[in-house]
Amino acid sequence: MAYVHQKKMLSYIRKLAFFLIAFFVAGPGQAQTEDASGSSWPDHAIRFIVSFPPGGATDIISREIAAGLQERTKQAVAVENVGGASGSIGVGRLAKSKNDGYTIGLGNSGTFTMTPYLQKVPYNPRTDFTPVSMLTEYSNVLVVGKKMKAKSVPEFIKEAQSSPEVLTYGSAGNGSSNHMTGVMFANATKLKFLHVPYKGNNPALLAVIGGEVDWMFATISEIKPFLESGKLRALGVSSLRADPLLPSVPPISDTVSGFNVVGFMGLFGPANMSPDITKKLTNEVNEILTSPGVIEKFARLGMRANPSSPEELAERVNADGALWKKAIADEQIKTN
């Protein structure tokens, strides 16, 4: 009897073992398929990497998108600020994250189309990410202080041509967005200027106001208070058409044919993210970007909400990257 009982027990154990093996092989495999296809996304918290410190425009934009995603998906979206090395540390962390749709991050013109060609970075902007959607576009504005007489771009060009001394322009530093826009303007007008880098946009703006340098490019949100007080004059915007956020200022392209230098911010995931998850994220983000409240908040930052497809964002990264790579190489620009 003991032998029969033992035999039955062994048979039961074998059946149980077979069942457990089948469950753990088929079960997780099925779960992986569901996760990969995105059918259950999102079912837990999402991490949103911001590659700059809290408080700036990039951080504010990111938190607005994160709040919108949290409201729409009913899942927590935690913003993680990872600053340093011109944003490349945070973007590098995003590139190395798991591509399951639960880690996303913001990239901009600097981190995706300029910095990779100015210094060594731990990522490839073209191959290490899944583009999701554009978030914003923003123009730079050519501004002068009271030291300059010009009140328009044509007058500015004439003043630069006739000046006995080379005009100077300020920026937030070597390789910064406004430095690079200044380089493109100099090349387009075939004028020579002396670049004076500062440690940030505010010191550069104060230098223009104080007459230390003659002019610079800056964003709409940065210059608005100084335009209203009369300390600065806006001569032209860097977009191809007039910027709706500064409609009274004509585009530089009215004078310099084809001049079009516009920055962007976009949402990305790690490379090879599920197409289904990417599509869901794109749809959610585009809905957020069409909200009147979000459009208004972005406008206060000098930004235009700009929903797009992943393909449009990828094209923008590639096109702008090629443009800036050539300009940086031609001018032999190095960071500070």
Image: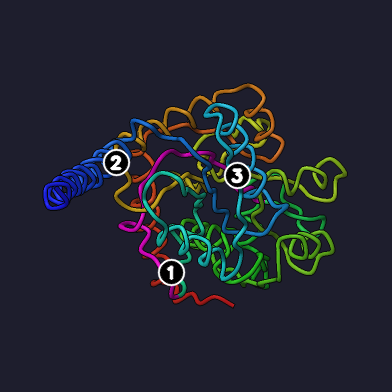
Residue that mark 3 sits on: 62
Do the residues bearing badges 3 and 1 touch, measured as CB atoms within 8 Å? no
Measured as percent of width and height from the top left, residue 203 is found at 77, 65
In this view, the residue farthest toward the front is 1
Taking depth in this image into account, of 95 and 189 the one nearest to the observer is 95
C-alpha span from label 3 to label 2: 25 Å
Q: Secondary structure at mark 3?
A: helix
Q: Is residue 170 visible?
A: yes
Which of label 1 and label 2 is nearer to you?
2
Q: Is residue 166 above or below residue 263?
A: below
Quadrant of residue 230 within the rendered picture: top right
The boundaries of the magenta stretch are 120-142
Which of label 3 and label 2 is nearer to you?
2
- Which three-letter amino acid code belongs to the residue tagged 1? Ile
Mark 2, Cα crowd under 10 Å, few <14 / some 14-19 / many 20+, is: some
Mark 1, Cα crowd under 10 Å, few <14 / some 14-19 / many 20+, is: some
The reply to whether the magenta stretch includes residue 156 is no
Ranked by sequence position, the earlier of labels 3 and 1 is 3
In this view, the residue farthest toward the right is 229
The reply to whether the magenta stretch includes residue 139 is yes
Residue drawn 29% across the image and 36% down it: 34
Residue that mark 1 sits on: 328
